[in-house]
Image (cartoon, rainbow, N blue to C red):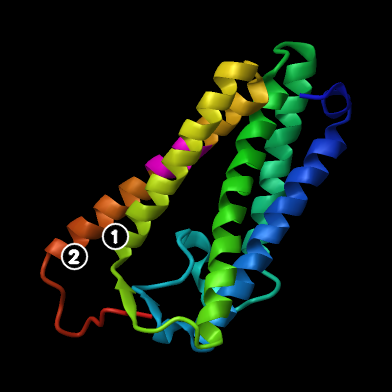
Amino acid sequence: MPPFFEANFWAGLVAWAALYVSDYYMTLTCARLYQNGVRDNFAFEGSYEITPQFQRDIDSLRRVSPRFFLALGLISAVLYLFWKVGRELMPGLYGFGLGMLISVQLAIHMRHLRNFHLFRAAARGEVRGRLEYPRQVMLRISSYEMLAFAAFFLVLFAFTTSWFVLGGVLGCLSVASKHWKLARAHASGMDAPAPESSARSTI
């Protein structure tokens, strides 16, 4: 990682925070396209948002989310601890932590850009037909994508031996594992008979 970022905590924080905020508002943009008609072509069971903690805010297209800004503050504090401890005791720790956060965001932004252009094409009528994605399929696809990014960063690490890139490997593996577990939990829940009053949401 460049010495400038090692010496200046704020530089890495600003880079990550900009991506994190962009992630939220790009999700809102795609969710708005989805709700305004794209769901006629692509129907996702449950919420468009994968992360359970933010589903209510995204579904309601909430521009200012207290939950989001709380997460922003907490993660910033943890990143500062990584920087402080790394400078005093463990060189490379801050680069590793920053690599985890930024690399995951870069992978997620690739997904946002793909969805944005695909949804815009659907909104213009350039996409025909309809696909329905069960929740566990959505989660498994997300897990596979993050696993692919982890493999990509692992190849980069083999050539660079960078703590920043190694953080990217672990960050993407962590998200892949989380989404795989959510997929399994959702599939297990669907195996059980649902109460008659329950409704299965497909959007």
Image position, residue 124 (x, y; %): 56, 87
**Figure quadrant of residue 130:** bottom left
Give the percent coordinates (x, y) of residue 74: 67, 45
Residue lying farthest left? Answer: 193
Regarding residue 57, the answer to whether it shows in the image is no
- Residue 121 % position (x, y): 55, 79
Label 1 with label 2: CB-CB less than 8 Å: yes
- Which amino acid is tagged 1? Gln
Label 1 secondary element: helix
Q: Secondary structure at mark 2?
A: helix
Question: In this view, which residue lies farthest toward the top?
Answer: 89
Q: Which residue is mark 2?
A: 190
Mark on residue 136?
Answer: 1
User: In the image, what residue occupies the spot 62% across and 15% down?
Assistant: 161
Near-viewer residue (98 or 88):
98
- Provide the residue span drawn in magenta: 172-177
Main SS of residues in magenta = helix
Q: Label 2 sits on what residue type?
A: Met
Q: Earlier in the sequence, mark 1 or mark 2?
A: 1
Assess disc 1: are there few (<14), some (14-19) or many (≥20) residues with their C-alpha within 10 Å of its C-alpha: many
User: Tag on residue 198?
Assistant: none
Residue 115 at x, y percent in the picture: 53, 67
Q: Nearer the viewer, residue 136 or 87?
A: 136
Above or below for 79 versus 161: below
* Quadrant in the picture for residue 81: top right
